[in-house]
Image (cartoon, rainbow, N blue to C red):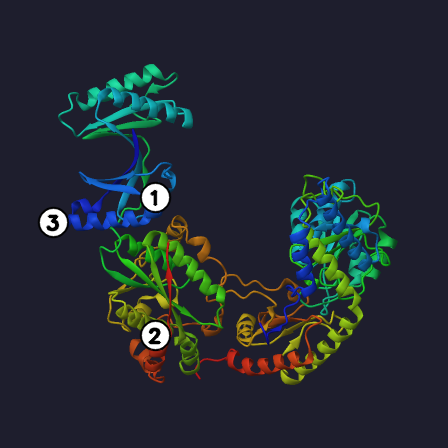
Amino acid sequence: MNKVILVRYGEIILKGLNRPVFEDKLIGNIKSAIFKFGKVKVIKSQGRIYIEPQEENYDFDAVLLKVAKVFGVVSVSPVWKVETDYETIKATSLKMASKLVEEKGYKTFKVETKRGNKRFPMQSPEISADVGGFILENIEGLSVDVKNPDFILYLEVRESTYIYSETIKAQGGMPLGSNGKAMLLLSGGIDSPVAGWMMGKRGVEIEAVHFYSYPYTSERAKQKVIDLARIMAQYCGKIRLHVVPFTEIQLKINDNCPEEQLTIIMRRIMMKIAEQIAEKVNAMALITGESMGQVASQTMQSLYCTDAAVNMPVFRPLIGMDKVEVIEIARRIETFDTSVLPYEDCCTVFVAKHPQTKPKLEKIIKSESVVDFEPLINTAVENTEVIIIKP
Amino acid sequence: MNNEIYLDNSATTKPYDEVIEYVAKVSREFYGNPSSLHTKGIESENLVKKARSQIAQALKVDSKDICFTSGGTESNNLAILGYLKANPRAGKHIITSEIEHPSVLEVYKQLAKDGYRVDFMPVDSDGVIKLDVLKDMISEETSIISIIHTNNETGSVQPIEEICNLRRKLCPNAVIHVDAVQAFGKTVINPTTCNVDLMSFSSHKIHGPKGVGGLYIRKGLRLKPVLIGGGQESALRSGTENVPGICGFGLAAEITFAKLDDNYKKAKELRNHFVKRINETFPDAVVNSPHSASPYIINVSFPNLKSEVLLHHLEQKNIFVSTGSACSSRKAHHSHVLKAMGVSPKYIDGAIRFSLSHSNNIYEMDKTIEALNEIIPIISIKRGGKR
């Protein structure tokens, strides 16, 4: 008997002739997610992926959690693999059932069989009934409940036979890198990491840009963004974080533009800088954590103005979500506790008392024209610090 | 770092070189557990004894009255909780001030939830408690009064002796606990002359190592431990003694107390000079620390700016200070001390604490004024809309 990990994937099964491309991408991502845990064989077979450790003392629990974080994986199960020989199947099934009863205190069960190997002489229901009976005879206090059992013992009879009970739900989505690359505007708040994660889940490779206004914001605000990127990297793989020195531009806006337009003009300049950096690294879109109507700079009119600042598509995966829904995801992906640390871009030096909620694009462009932002933007882009963040 | 100007000595101090060397020596050579029966253990035990007597001499008390802890927070917790646990028949009424350090304030808030009647003494605009209010508060039922000797944010000093006298007249059974963390090693405090029962102090505020502190406990006063275990520190504070830390603390106390008067004079000169320069250079600024405060702490409010922004700009010039309150858009955490003194929110937002040590000098104070003069015009929030 060998312990292996069964990985199921979803959506990419539906792909046509490109399917192998996606599958290979997924396998590559799984391999790189778990390579540090030791040598494994990764086998693709009949729409499934099997991870077979080639070492003793393999840390199954850690690897299961790790693989469950790989985008494109729908679920994972720790599986016992045995040769397709009926006596062996029976004995191993009993062993697994005893282990579960002992560890979890289960009282009821049923057996479900899928016979993919049609050369095997018994049919699926027959195998289920017989193995179930064998387990009942040998474990005291256990009974069968086909409607709502404490556990189901799954038998998959193929070239080899796979026996398992436990399934860990994973994230679904598309394999990372199967859908190009985009640049995430990462602020340190609750929303932007979630937006990055959602796009990553659709197979988009993520790089991030952060605008840093030292000494108006603290060193800790930057550290917080690095920490957030590190949490995201567990899902999205290596993230290149571009930290843009933004103080001078903010001061320029503050000194020369009407107060109620500060925020919207700042957003537009941020977008322009992000776009330039995106072009440099061959990213094809921008991602923001904006959500319709959440704050003044996220009204329909404001979004119209920020979009107009760039030519690239801007993805806003949270656009139709409520804050509560965003927080729920943030908690699940474990960015929430870091996001709510109180030293965000806290200092309100650059925030108007009443920012405009319905800016007019032509007026904004007019206000902007007072300052020649282009050289400032170029300088900011040139002086951007790149931090490579590994999972 | 050369040419840095460190004005955040109320947060922590730079350890003396002698202390660093001594801590390293003790760690290297005397690694025995003081509880061990062999020579190694006895050596360590003797070093702890020596440190205890250094602290006791500094406070002019008996060695037996000193209990070592992990610092000011633990000393405060042990004093209050330890006393109340050991004296369940003492009254259910307790008194503290509105301007205590969180390690006292939060304990009292917890006790209020646990059924104690807690009174918080208000303070005047100098941050000093009003004795007549205290007089009204004290009752037969009062079991403990906690008061901070020198406030950590403004340096305001409380009339400890008068408080002890009031207690003697009105409620002789109440005990008085003084949080002397910011006063220890800076001004003469002597628990026996003013009849204080419990007094907390901390090593890292007097150029000793971090993670060590102490509690003075008047003879005959019963406390129950908060940390329970092997019975170290006369069963008041279990856990293997932090021998190197305690030794460093003892040495730091000896060095500090030997120069206490000279240092105090110097701090006073620096403070007076600095405050004068602040008033001359920034007519809008308000010095929140009263003249009667400890000269080591100078709290100043600059209106129309965010103190954190000023802090980072000073930091760029290698000058290190603290804000009077954390500024955050998410939760407007206002300094409870300045609020209790009646400082308006506008001034609390721009509060900066400059805190001194013996190693600061006039030149550094002038450099700081110069730096402020460069920074403040740049970062002041301009009022009004279009410019």
Kindly report the distance in space between the C-alpha atoms of the residues bearing marks 1 and 2. 40 Å
Quarter holding residue B230: top right
Query: A264 or B241, which is in the foreground?
Result: B241
The image's mark for residue A38 is 1
Chain hosting mark 1? A
Q: Is residue B290 left or right of residue A60?
A: right
- Residue at horizontal 29%, vertical 79%? A362
Task: Kindly state the secondary structure of the residue where label 1 is placed.
Answer: loop
Q: Is residue A297 left or right of residue B254?
A: left
Give amino acid for label 3: Leu
Q: Residues within 10 Å of mark 3 (few under 14, many from 20)?
A: few
Task: Kindly state the secondary structure of the residue where label 2 is placed.
Answer: helix
Give amino acid for label 1: Gly
Kindly report the distance in space between the C-alpha atoms of the residues bearing marks 3 and 2. 41 Å
The answer, for residue B104, to whether it is visible in the render is no
What residue sits right under mark 3 in the picture?
Answer: A17
Label 3 and label 2 in one chain = yes
Q: Measured along the vertical axis of the image, is residue A14 above or below residue B166?
A: above
Give amino acid for label 2: Val
Kindly report the distance in space between the C-alpha atoms of the residues bearing marks 3 and 1. 33 Å
Task: Kindly state the secondary structure of the residue where label 3 is placed.
Answer: loop
Quarter of the image with the N terminus of chain B in it: bottom right
Where is residue B104 shown, x and y percent of the image? 68, 54
The image's mark for residue B151 is none
What residue sits right under mark 2 in the picture?
Answer: A381
Query: B344 or A115, which is in the foreground?
Result: A115
Chain hosting mark 2? A
Query: B306 or B226, which is in the foreground?
Result: B226
- Residue at horizontal 30%, vertical 58%? A317
Where is residue A183 shown, x and y percent of the image? 30, 64
